[in-house]
């Protein structure tokens, strides 16, 4: 996906969230538990900042969106999943 197309695909997210996010907002955006967000920020999987001596993480929306874009999963031929046929996905 081209960068300009990718940027437009996140326009709704940009409109719904402020430029700086807290842990709860990132958890909501990514549909994760807040503790998972904290763990991912702590080990570097999610880009985050802290004020010196602070305990709270702060997240820049653009950094989170860039991380999502950089870690896109594309279906591989050997995955066994037919992306066009939702019935082929095993939900058990």
Image: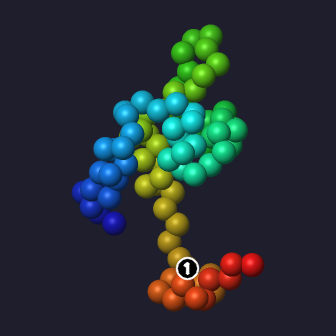
Q: Nearer the viewer, residue 44 or 36?
A: 36
Seen as rendered, the residue at the extreme top is: 53
Question: Would you place residue 73 above or below residue 78 in this image?
Answer: above
Residue 37 falls left or right of residue 3 = right
Please tell me in which quadrant of the rendered image residue 41 appears. top right
Residue at the image position 57 percent from the left and 51 percent from the top: 31
Badge 1 element: loop
User: What's the colour scheme?
Assistant: rainbow
* Residue 79 pos. (x, y %): 62, 81
* Residue 36 pos. (x, y %): 68, 43
Residue at the image position 37 percent from the left and 48 percent from the top: 13
Residue of label 1: 76
Figure quadrant of the C terminus: bottom right
Residue at the image position 54 percent from the left and 84 percent from the top: 86
Question: Would you place residue 91 above or below residue 4 in this image?
Answer: below
Q: Nearer the viewer, residue 22 or 51?
A: 22
Please tell me in which quadrant of the rendered image residue 33 appears. top right
* Residue 8 pos. (x, y %): 27, 56
Q: Is residue 77 visible?
A: no
Question: Would you place residue 68 above or below residue 72 in this image?
Answer: above
* Residue 60 pos. (x, y %): 43, 33
Q: Is residue 69 visible?
A: yes
Q: Nearer the viewer, residue 90 or 50?
A: 90
Question: How many other residues sit within 10 Å of disc 1, few (<14), some (14-19) or many (≥20)?
Answer: few
């Amino acid at each position: 996906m081209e960068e300009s197309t990718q940027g437009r695909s996140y326009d709704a997210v940009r409109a719904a969230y402020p430029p700086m996010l807290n842990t709860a907002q990132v958890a909501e955006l990514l549909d994760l538990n807040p503790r998972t967000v904290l763990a991912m920020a702590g080990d570097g999987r999610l880009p985050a900042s802290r004020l010196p001596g602070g305990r709270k993480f702060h997240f820049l929306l653009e950094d989170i969106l860039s991380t999502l874009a950089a870690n896109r999963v594309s279906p591989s031929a050997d995955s066994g999943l037919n992306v066009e046929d939702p019935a082929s996905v095993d939900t058990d």
